[in-house]
Image (cartoon, rainbow, N blue to C red):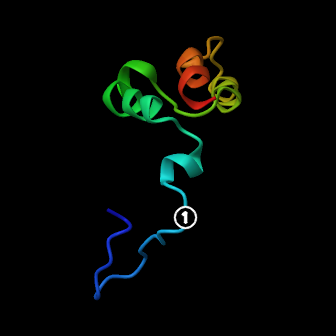
Amino acid sequence: TSRYIHPTKRGKVEHTLPTILERLNIEREQWLTLTTQFEACFKHAVGKEALLEQYAHNQHQQRVQGRQSARRLLG
């Protein structure tokens, strides 16, 4: 929908750019899982594994929740 051209709107995405999933380096299957099972995959914070580890440390948590989902879905 961001590629749609409307005369009164700004911010369209050029057709020459890769899709948003390609730019984010997320596979379609990963995106589908993220959007349909989001709350089951992540409990408190969402991000790549290193960011979840940093979050857990800052929150004084010993366990990193969502580590497997982060590896599987976000790389």
Residue shown at the point (53%, 68%) measured from the top left: 16
Residue shown at the point (66%, 26%) measured from the top left: 49
Quadrant occupied by the N terminus: bottom left
Q: Which residue is mark 1?
A: 17
In terms of image quadrants, where is residue 38? top left
Residue shown at the point (67%, 33%) measured from the top left: 51
Tell me if 73 is positioned left or right of 35 in this view: right
Tell me if 21 is positioned left or right of 12 in this view: right
Residue at the extreme bottom of the image, as rendered:
7
Question: As displayed, is residue 14 above or below residue 27?
Answer: below
The x and y percentages for residue 32 are 37, 32
Mark 1: amino acid: Leu
Tell me if 31 is positioned left or right of 69 in this view: left
Q: Secondary structure at mark 1?
A: loop
Q: Nearer the viewer, residue 32 or 66?
A: 32
The x and y percentages for residue 45 are 52, 31
In terms of image quadrants, where is residue 25? top right
Q: Nearer the viewer, residue 1 or 53?
A: 1
